């Protein structure tokens, strides 16, 4: 990591990289995109369901292509390219077709690159193979991550010549693919590709030592001012400058990123490129997260049979060794146990909450101090707290189905999926009013709300919102109406997919 100074060590490019556009917007649709011709989109990402996932990025890559192809495959052909990690099962590998191999030049290096193709759930996937970079136990967290994903970015562009596919647009996700728009801008004009860059979480920007410029990236000298920022290479900053369009995963997060508290040093870059930054809310897979059919939960139920949710509650209480008490409100936390997710203010108010007649179940791993705290809490408040210091997707589903309230007090949250999943299962969210949490959860005190929202980031305000929730819980009729209401909210990818489609059509009109 390079040192961070208060000033940039190289002058910034003057203003954003402007792209000449030619658009005619009629009835909120972009016309003239070549009717009868499909728009080909290649999504590049570092993870994706169903092959491997570590968080929300992987969920999006698994759901968005399917949502577009489900309703609009006559107009769009969306395919995905991913690294061929060691964790991909032999069964999946055996289904893959080898398309070819070549060498990728990464400054002075020449690295092998193999390209494979497979289909899954109606989507075509391509995989970039290089065992030196991707034969690892986990996808991220290595000292050479900058080099690994510089290789991936360049390999994606080089691999297009062996694919049975000619993309018009390349949709890049987060810092791991941030070099793709940069390489396109400086070195790959011949591909005639328009780039869309999606910021899933600006906390992770792909910062690297300055030696990466010449030793790894290998772009001409004029690229330095784009890649260098605050004394280091910042890949996300460079992608924001070079991409044709930039989007974030919720409208409110897009607005927040103009403020350095949320933008983590990139607010000025976001402001400078503001005309090409847009927020599009993530969705969830409503078929995957469906209490009526989910095989992971104890008893299936729907809006019309919410009384069966109580059976999931009592079975969950038995499973986690809490007293079986149907009337006692059960609070759930399913989260990484880190400050960023608001666990510090949970710890600040938890013992006050436990003085009430409540139960709490926590599922997650994270910072050691929080893991130890929740273990201690379980010992101190036996019969009230179940701390499960692990992560298990099957258990998470059982907790969504069995809990009454779902706590998500994130300090910042680009979009968040858990609050939408919890709603789908009838667990009422209590959230901090930031990012996508503000876009998806409205406070019940303001009319037809679907949860409880606190504004000031502290334990007392969180506790106050919990007490407002408990007041509603006391009235069984009102509570059942609320649970029934939130289970029916459409958090699907349908609307969001249409917004991406409009963005693709805009990009298809860009003149190169």
Image (cartoon, rainbow, N blue to C red):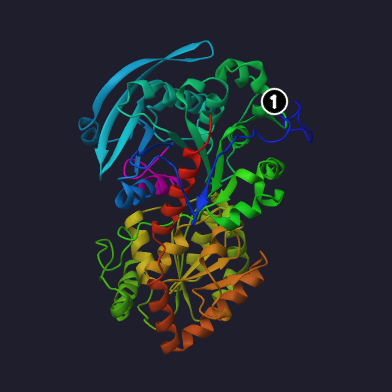
| Residue that protrudes farthest toward the right in the picture | 7
Percent of width and height locating residue 96:
24, 30
Q: Is residue 489 magenta?
A: no
Q: Quadrant of the N terminus?
A: top right
Which residue position holds label 1? 225
Image height of 25 relative to 124, above or below: below
Residue closer to the observer: 267 or 370: 267
State the residue at coordinates (70%, 45%): 271
State the residue at coordinates (60%, 35%): 20
Q: Bin the neighbour count of mark 1 within 10 Å (Cα to Cα): few under 14, some 14-19, many 20 and up.
A: some
Callout 1 secondary element? helix
Percent of width and height locating residue 136:
40, 29
Q: Quadrant of residue 99?
A: top left
- Is residue 68 shown left or right of residue 195? left
Percent of width and height locating residue 488:
38, 72
Residue 389 appears in the rendering: no
Image height of 471 relative to 86, above or below: below
Residue 93 appears in the rendering: yes
- Is residue 239 shown left or right of residue 88? right
State the residue at coordinates (54%, 78%): 444
Q: Which residues are magenta?
A: 47-62
Percent of width and height locating residue 18:
64, 35
* Count of number-bearing discs: 1
Residue closer to the observer: 130 or 280: 280
Q: Is residue 58 magenta?
A: yes
Image height of 108 relative to 411, above or below: above
């Amino acid at each position: 990591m390079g040192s961070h100074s208060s000033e940039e060590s190289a002058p910034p490019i003057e203003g954003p990289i402007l792209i000449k556009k030619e658009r005619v917007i009629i009835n909120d649709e972009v016309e003239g995109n070549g009717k009868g011709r499909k728009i080909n989109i290649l999504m590049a990402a570092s993870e994706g369901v169903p092959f491997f996932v570590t968080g929300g990025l992987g969920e999006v890559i698994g759901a968005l292509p399917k949502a577009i192809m489900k309703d609009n495959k006559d107009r769009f052909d969306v395919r995905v390219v991913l690294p061929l990690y060691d964790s991909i099962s032999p069964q999946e590998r055996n289904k893959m077709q080898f398309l070819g191999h070549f060498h990728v030049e990464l400054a002075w290096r020449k690295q092998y690159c193999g390209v494979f193709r497979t289909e899954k759930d109606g989507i075509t996937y391509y995989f970039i193979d290089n065992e030196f970079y991707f034969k690892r136990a986990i996808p991220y967290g290595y000292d050479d991550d900058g080099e690994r994903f510089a290789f991936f970015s360049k390999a994606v562009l080089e691999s297009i010549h062996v694919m049975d596919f000619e993309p018009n647009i390349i949709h890049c996700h987060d810092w791991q693919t941030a070099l793709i728009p940069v390489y396109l801008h400086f070195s790959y004009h011949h591909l005639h590709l328009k780039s869309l860059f999606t910021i899933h979480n600006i906390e992770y920007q792909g910062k690297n030592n300055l030696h990466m410029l010449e030793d790894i990236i290998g772009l001409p000298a004029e690229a330095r001012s784009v890649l260098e920022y605050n004394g280091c290479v910042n890949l996300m900053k460079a992608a924001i400058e070079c991409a044709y369009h930039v989007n974030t995963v919720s409208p409110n997060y897009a607005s927040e990123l103009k403020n350095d508290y949320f933008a983590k040093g990139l607010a000025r870059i976001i402001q400078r490129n503001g005309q090409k930054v847009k927020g599009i809310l993530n969705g969830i897979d409503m078929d995957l997260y469906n209490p009526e059919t989910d095989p992971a939960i104890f008893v299936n139920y729907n809006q019309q049979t919410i009384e069966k949710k109580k059976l999931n509650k009592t079975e969950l209480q038995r499973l986690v060794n809490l007293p079986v008490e149907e009337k006692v409100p059960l609070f759930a936390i399913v989260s990484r146990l880190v400050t960023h997710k608001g666990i510090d203010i949970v710890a600040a108010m938890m013992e006050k909450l436990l003085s009430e007649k409540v139960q709490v179940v926590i599922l997650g791993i994270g910072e050691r101090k929080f893991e130890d705290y929740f273990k201690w809490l379980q010992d101190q408040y036996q019969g009230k707290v179940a701390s499960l210091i692990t992560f298990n997707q099957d258990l998470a589903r059982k907790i969504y189905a069995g809990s009454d309230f779902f706590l998500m007090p994130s300090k910042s949250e680009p979009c968040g999926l858990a609050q939408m999943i919890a709603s789908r299962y009838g667990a009422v969210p209590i959230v901090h009013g930031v990012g996508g949490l503000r876009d998806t959860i409205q406070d019940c005190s303001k009319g037809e709300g679907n949860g409880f929202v606190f504004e000031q980031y502290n334990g007392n305000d969180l506790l106050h919102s919990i007490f407002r929730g408990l007041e509603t819980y006391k009235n069984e009729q009102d509570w059942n109406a609320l649970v029934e209401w939130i289970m029916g909210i459409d958090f699907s990818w349908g609307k969001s997919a249409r917004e991406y489609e409009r963005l693709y059509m805009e990009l298809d009109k860009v003149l190169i």
